[in-house]
Image (spheres, helix red, strand yellow):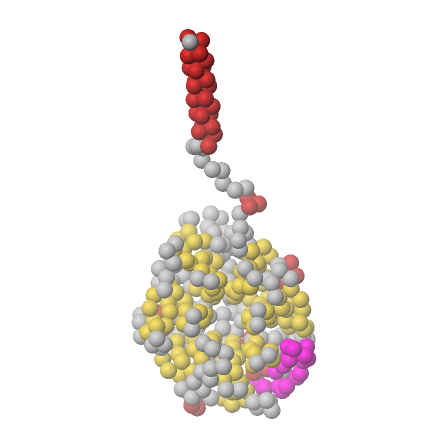
Amino acid sequence: MLLKNCYKKVLTGFLFFISLFIISISCDSTEPQPPPDDKITKWEIIPELADMDVRYILKHNNTIYLTAVQGIEWRGIIWKTTDGENWSIVRKFNKAIGPLTTNGDTLYCLGDSLFRYIIPLDKWENICQPYPLNTDVQAVSEMIFLDYELYALQNRFTPGATYKIHFDGSIEDLSIYYNYFGGAKFIKKNINDDWCYVRGMYYSGGFFLFNRFTFTKLKDGLSHESWLYPPSNSMEIKNDTLFAGFRYPGTIKYLDNNSIWRDYTDSIPCNRDSVFLYRIEPTEITFINETMFISTDELGVMKWKNGEGWSDLSEGLKTYNVANVKLFYPIVFLENINENLIAAYGAPGYAAWGGVGVYRLKLN
């Protein structure tokens, strides 16, 4: 009996020791190690686009079309991708090219001529030479079709102008109707709309609704500074609502009921490491599901998610060579496709910052 009790005590102690050992393994209190450098999400240069001075990006039917110029002769080129990783050349040009637009399944490009690319037929046509817009395409910031009529904005030279391009090569200066107005960007809410939103020129400001006959101001909810000094692009349509970036302070707003601007995000953080900036300019906006991504003029790319706030996504992008200061080159274009973010540098007519190269960030 005594021996049996001794065996019980030994067995109980042994089981207790095993239990403690298992618990100690499963409850390791050491801090988790950060991922190695090669696991950190970083932007990567797209090799074949490394020397591209990008002039326009357009997303159409799950395909990104990108116009650029390259070399000292500024020869134009159009690239496309359906996944963000593999890029192919659509066409090369002898001279510079500028903005793109679509009408149905046809892509239009302004160069030394107005070109038309019928996508399903893989067929190019030279439509006309809309003089003088075809002589300096960098001065033409944007084109759009409204009710099958082609409109263009010139905003590089003061005071700017709005034009209608006719396919016989003639152009109609609409300044006599709208005064001298040269906007920076058009954007439609729906592809078949016969009206659009327009951002004003970089240095003269304004936000408008354009219905082919009048420019109606959209300024309710904006401060005086926000109205006068808007970023030159940073517009996006999501859920039938217009979102746009503003400076002073840097923030993203949405147009409520097509009439009043309301804040969508907190102010963009103006400091990073040892850098503090008076204002931040959101240069472009894109959405993936409910997550917003923005590019900026000096702080790279940032992400906004409701409930989480702002976070930085700039690792790997180009920075200025300044000791102890991490300032990024202005990113002019930001788009997404197939869970890839595409960031591009260049000098389009509405924001001639300059720079070359196209980068890709694969999102998890």
Q: Quadrant of the N terminus?
A: top left
Q: Is residue 247 magenta?
A: no
Residue 223 is situated, as x and y percent measured from the top left of the image, at 31, 70
Which residue lies at the image location 47% right of the left edge and 51% below the top edge? 326
Q: Where 304 sits versus 159, above or below?
A: above
356 sits left or right of 191 in the view: right
Residue 48 is situated, as x and y percent measured from the top left of the image, at 66, 61
- The residue lying toward the viewer, choosing from 100 and 119, is 119
Residue 248 visible somewhere in the drawing: no
Q: Where 15 sits versus 28, above or below?
A: above
- The residue lying toward the viewer, choosing from 42 and 23, is 23
Which residue lies at the image location 49% right of the left edge and 54% below the top edge? 314
Q: Which residues are magenta?
A: 114-132
Residue 16 visible somewhere in the drawing: yes
Furthest-top residue in this view: 2
Residue 24 is situated, as x and y percent measured from the top left of the image, at 45, 28
Which residue lies at the image location 50% right of the left edge and 86% below the top edge? 147
The quadrant where residue 104 appears: bottom right
- The residue lying toward the viewer, choosing from 245 and 132, is 245
Which residue lies at the image location 55% right of the left edge and 44% below the top edge? 37
